Amino acid sequence: YLFQPSVNNADVKKTDEYIDMFWREHFDRTFTTLYATGQKHLLPGETYIFMSNHESWMDIPAMFGAAPKSLRMVAKAGLMKIPVLGHA
């Protein structure tokens, strides 16, 4: 579900709600607190690229939680050949 492109505002809203639940659930289940700094430097209406060094499996939920607006991921096409992430 996370890897399918959104085509209209209803899809974007539904995806954003799912992602919000996804990262909150991961942090709640691991008793982890997310602290994000620097958000005051992000200008409304601008587009940004956020990158992670993937130090742990919590990086992706943290990126979703720290982003102040809608966030979409970009992945290498070869990852979609992994059955857990895409169609094998």
Image (tube, grey):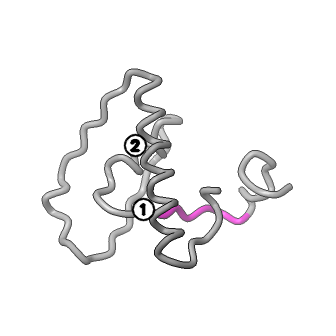
Q: Along the horizontal axis of the image, is 77 left or right of 29? A: right
Q: Along the horizontal axis of the image, is 62 left or right of 85? A: left
| Residue on which disc 2 sits | 62
In 3D space, how far apart are the residues under numbered discs 1 and 2 (Cα atoms)?
12 Å
Name the magenta segment's main secondary structure: loop
Q: Which mark is residue 12?
A: none
The stretch in magenta equals 71-77
Q: Residue at x 51, y 60 (%)?
A: 15
Q: Position of residue 40 (x, y in %)?
A: 13, 58
Kindly state the secondary structure of the residue where label 2 is placed.
Answer: helix
Q: Residues within 10 Å of mark 1 (few under 14, many from 20)?
A: some
Q: Position of residue 17 (x, y in %)?
A: 45, 54
| Vertical placement of residue 83 versus 55, above or below | below
Q: Position of residue 81 (x, y in %)?
A: 80, 57
Q: Earlier in the sequence, mark 1 or mark 2?
A: 2
Q: Where is the C terminus found, in terms of image quarters?
A: bottom right
Q: Which mark is residue 71?
A: 1
- Please state which of residues 22 and 37 is positioned toward the viewer in this rendering: 22
Tell me, yes or no, whether the highlighted magenta stretch contains residue 80. no
| Vertical placement of residue 84 versus 80, above or below | above
Q: Residues within 10 Å of mark 2 (few under 14, many from 20)?
A: some
Q: Where is the N terminus found, in terms of image quarters?
A: bottom right
Q: Residue at x 55, y 65 (%)?
A: 74
Q: Residue at x 38, y 21 (%)?
A: 31
Kindly state the secondary structure of the residue where label 1 is placed.
Answer: loop
